[in-house]
């Protein structure tokens, strides 16, 4: 029964977006991937949710500025396990064009484990959807193993 | 004793309980699929709402430190129990005529607001400011959509009762329609039917009236702090509420069966519920955006209530 449930559960990944000081370029692409008829993430069972408590897959964009760092970590802690993190764009990994700024904390993976990285500045919607598909695979493993990753 | 057994069967298996849950999840799935098709998307599979429930059951449950834990956990249970009991009262034309003595419009007026009450309790208990915002929006909207509901109930009761006064039992309303044709085709009742069709999206908070749980504004309001199985119970509650509201509308305006066989009649009933869902929830939701709370309130006061009152007045004059 539990096995059956863990097979079906990953078919409903709910998505939550965190903007960690992004320039909004990646956010526009994420909105494009979600909201217009051309790119349909809902066929994967995805739903964008407004509350971190409902989320399974977290999309993080932006270079993690010092000002938002603690808030991002707080919101990340509010997400119930099992959860998967996807870094959207190059910013979460290297800081992108902001990389040597005094106010930027990238790489995010020092604070939050990034399971999937979708590089690009900004990445195309197809790439974001591909990243979500990979995140669903990670989510499947995580649900099956009952593994929890806590930052 | 048989009465208690009958009531227990009605609440747990058919037409409440398992049947209502299955039908509710199916209706939700059709709603999402059809909505996606309207936007030329592929959309989620029909069983998506069931998958969501299963997923939520594998998630961790978090209860905020500052929340009132008892009320926080009781609210979804209360809501689900309430709608399941309501579903047990719903008659299905040609299949089931309701638990004896329970199918009554006055009882329904008390049972129908229970899910909204549960939402308010949830919003209040979660101690989140967005929860409280959702609470107040839900309550305001409820006052607005209860008015046309009561008025159209009265119009139906007076119309059915005729010269003998008013008929409040669902049994009487159904048998009147078996004799005289569905109220949907009765010109006197047309405004009340329209008001009832506006009540459905109002109580389901969709389309124009997606005010209490507006995701971009109040972050899903009362549901903001819920996670895991408790959220799954809320999803089930909303699915059963959808069946209850649609079945009620079917019973009030077009309960007529088509065939002799129970299976055919049940399929016909489900078909009517689906049609009603597509018209008054899905297409409505796809075609309209959200109103502000005051606009939503005055929409019901200015347009919907007078429609139902026109029917009531005509029914009283023609009795």
Image (tube, rainbow, N blue to C red):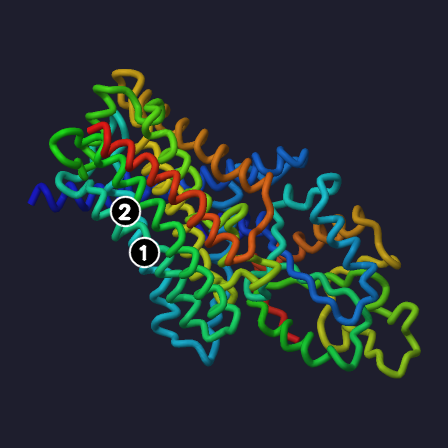
Count neighbours of disc 2 (C-alpha within 10 A) and say few if under 14, some if 14 to 19, many if 20 or more.
Answer: many
Q: Is residue B65 visible?
A: yes
Which quadrant, please, contains the C terminus of chain A? bottom right
Which structural element holds mark 2? Answer: helix
Residue at the location (49% across, 57% down)?
Answer: B56
Residue topped by disc 2: B86
Residue at the location (35% across, 26% down)?
Answer: B184
Q: Are marks 2 and 1 in contact (CB under 8 Å)?
A: yes
How many numbered badges does the structure rendering display? 2
Q: CA distance from mark 2 to mark 1?
A: 9 Å
- Give residue A75's position: percent from left, percent from top: 63, 73
Q: Is residue B22 visible?
A: no
Which structural element holds mark 1? Answer: helix
Residue B143: image quadrant is bottom left
Residue at the location (23% across, 42% down)?
Answer: B89
Most foreground residue, B137 or B228: B137
């Amino acid at each position: 029964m539990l096995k059956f449930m863990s097979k079906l559960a990953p078919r409903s990944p709910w998505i939550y977006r965190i903007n960690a000081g992004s320039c909004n370029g990646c956010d526009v692409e994420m909105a494009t991937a979600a909201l217009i008829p051309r790119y349909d993430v809902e066929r994967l069972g995805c739903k964008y949710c407004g509350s971190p408590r409902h989320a399974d897959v977290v999309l993080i964009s932006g270079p993690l500025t010092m000002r938002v760092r603690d808030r991002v970590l707080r919101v990340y802690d509010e997400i119930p396990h099992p959860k998967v993190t996807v870094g959207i764009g190059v910013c979460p990994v290297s800081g992108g064009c902001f990389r040597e700024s005094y106010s930027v904390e990238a790489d995010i993976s020092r604070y939050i484990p990034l399971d999937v990285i979708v590089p690009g500045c900004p990445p195309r919607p197809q790439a974001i959807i591909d990243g979500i598909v990979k995140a669903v695979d990670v989510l499947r493993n995580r649900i099956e193993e009952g593994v929890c990753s806590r930052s | 004793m048989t009465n208690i057994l009958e009531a227990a069967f009605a609440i747990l298996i058919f037409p409440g309980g398992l049947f209502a849950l299955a039908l509710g999840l199916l209706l939700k799935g059709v709603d999402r699929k059809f909505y996606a098709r309207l936007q030329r998307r592929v959309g989620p599979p029909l069983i998506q709402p069931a998958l969501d429930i299963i997923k939520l059951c594998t998630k961790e449950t978090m209860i905020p430190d500052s929340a009132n834990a008892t009320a926080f956990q009781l609210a979804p249970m209360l809501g689900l129990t309430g709608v399941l009991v309501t579903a047990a009262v719903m008659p299905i034309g040609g299949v089931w005529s309701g638990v004896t003595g329970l199918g009554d419009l006055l009882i329904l007026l008390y049972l129908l607001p229970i899910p909204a009450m549960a939402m308010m309790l949830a919003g209040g208990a979660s101690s989140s400011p967005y929860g409280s915002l959702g609470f107040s929006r839900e309550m305001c909207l409820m006052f607005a959509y209860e008015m046309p509901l009561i008025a159209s109930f009265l119009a139906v009761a007076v119309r059915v009762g005729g010269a003998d006064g008013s008929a409040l039992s669902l049994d009487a309303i159904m048998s009147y329609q078996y004799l005289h044709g569905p109220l949907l085709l009765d010109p006197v009742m047309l405004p009340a039917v329209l008001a009832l069709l506006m009540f459905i999206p109002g109580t389901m908070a969709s389309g124009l009236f997606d005010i209490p749980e507006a995701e971009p504004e109040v972050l899903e309001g009362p549901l903001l702090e819920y996670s895991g199985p408790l959220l799954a119970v809320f999803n089930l509650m909303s699915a059963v509420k959808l069946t209850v509201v649609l079945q009620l509308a079917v019973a009030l305006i077009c309960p007529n069966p088509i065939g002799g066989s129970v299976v055919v009649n049940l399929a016909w009933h489900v078909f009517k519920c689906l049609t009603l869902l597509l018209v008054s929830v899905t297409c409505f939701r796809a075609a309209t955006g959200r109103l502000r709370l005051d606009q939503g309130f005055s929409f019901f006061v200015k347009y919907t209530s007078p429609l139902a009152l026109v029917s009531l007045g005509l029914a009283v004059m023609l009795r």
